[in-house]
Image (cartoon, helix red, strand yellow):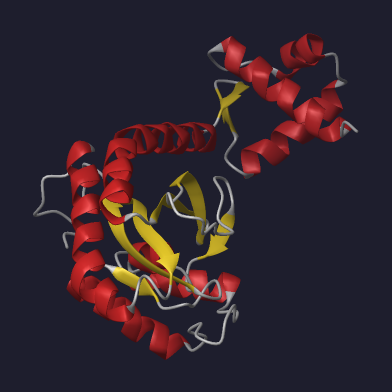
């Protein structure tokens, strides 16, 4: 069932986008068919959250709209660039591979290639998972500043998902330091029972975290020994290949 207030906001944003420059409240009121006081209240809220700005006696789209659009474009590019690398990684290992980004402190899957074997995991494109219990999340958190990590912990906590989940802040920070040192993270059956994963962060052309790639499978197939000696370096190299395709050249912030 449509929500009237949301539909009004969408109509207003579309009117601002069509205008291409500052529009006065009375003009917007006529365009969207809403009373001026209603338009003004909606604009006040949009301005407070950065979706609109007051300029030259009118209103125009705000920087947050552009930021969201830029994030979406980056994700599309990341997925397109990453797909051949994911396919090669899956074919070489026979395990399931994922590509994900960190959104508001949580892992969001943007691509997944299933293992050719019978095992199927709970992950799916668009699904959201905690950062602290996944190899993807730990790989990305490890390359973020300490204040960002602390903010994620404060916001989402460290809920237990399996008996192996790290739920202690100090232990998680220790783990992230190890991830930085070796260039890949291990989810040691911490997010899903019976599943072990290895992940590494992908960097953009500025050397900042753009996402992460991971390899996942049954804990009986991906043993800790195999994860550390064989699959970790392989996933790390896959992440570097995607990073290079995005324009990363090394020697920048976040270099592994």
Above or below: residue 102 compared with residue 224: above
x, y percent for residue 216: 41, 62
* Residue at image location 39% in from the left, 69% down from the top: 138
Q: Locate residue 159, reporting x and y percent.
A: 60, 79
Residue situated in front as seen by the camera: 115 or 159: 115
Query: Which quarter of the rendered picture does the C terminus lie within?
Result: bottom left
Q: Position of residue 144 (x, y in %)?
A: 33, 64
Please state which of residues 201 and 49 is positioned toward the viewer in this rendering.
Answer: 201
Left or right, residue 203 beside residue 17: left
In the image, taking residue 82 as reference, residue 39 lies left or right, namely: right
Q: In this view of the protein, which residue sits in the foreground, 221 or 68?
A: 221
The reply, left or right, for residue 251 in relation to residue 210 is left
Residue 249 figure quarter: top left
User: Residue at (10%, 51%) from the top-left corner?
Assistant: 250
Residue located 54% across and 45% down the image? 125
Indicate whether 126 appears above or below 83.
below
| Quadrant occupied by the N terminus | top right
Can see residue 224? Answer: yes
- Whether residue 148 is visible to the viewer of this picture, yes or no, is no
The residue that appears at 32% across and 70% down in the rendered structure is 185
Q: Closer to the camera, 106 or 70?
A: 106
> As drawn, which residue projects farthest toward the front?
118
């Amino acid at each position: 069932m449509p929500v009237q207030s949301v539909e009004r906001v969408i109509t207003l944003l579309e009117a601002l986008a069509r205008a291409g420059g500052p529009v006065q409240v009375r003009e917007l009121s006529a365009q969207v068919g809403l009373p001026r006081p209603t338009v003004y209240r909606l604009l006040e809220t949009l301005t407070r959250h950065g979706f609109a700005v007051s300029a030259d006696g009118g209103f125009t789209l705000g920087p947050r709209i552009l930021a969201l659009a830029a994030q979406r474009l980056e994700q599309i590019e990341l997925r397109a660039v990453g797909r051949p690398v994911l396919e090669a990684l899956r074919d070489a290992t026979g395990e399931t591979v994922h590509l994900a980004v960190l959104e508001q402190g949580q892992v969001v899957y943007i691509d997944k290639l299933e293992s050719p074997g019978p095992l199927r995991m709970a992950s799916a494109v668009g699904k959201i998972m905690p950062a602290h219990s996944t190899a993807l999340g730990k790989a990305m958190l490890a390359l973020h500043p300490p204040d960002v990590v602390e903010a994620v912990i404060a916001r989402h906590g460290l809920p237990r998902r399996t008996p192996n989940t790290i739920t202690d802040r100090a232990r998680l920070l220790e783990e992230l330091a190890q991830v930085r040192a070796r260039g890949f993270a291990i989810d040691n059956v911490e997010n899903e029972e019976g599943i072990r994963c290895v992940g590494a962060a992908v960097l953009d052309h500025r050397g900042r975290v753009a996402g992460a790639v991971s390899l996942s499978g049954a804990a009986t197939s991906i043993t800790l020994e195999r994860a550390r000696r064989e699959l970790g370096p392989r996933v790390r190299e896959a992440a570097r290949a995607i990073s290079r395709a995005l324009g990363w050249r090394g020697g920048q912030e976040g270099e592994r």
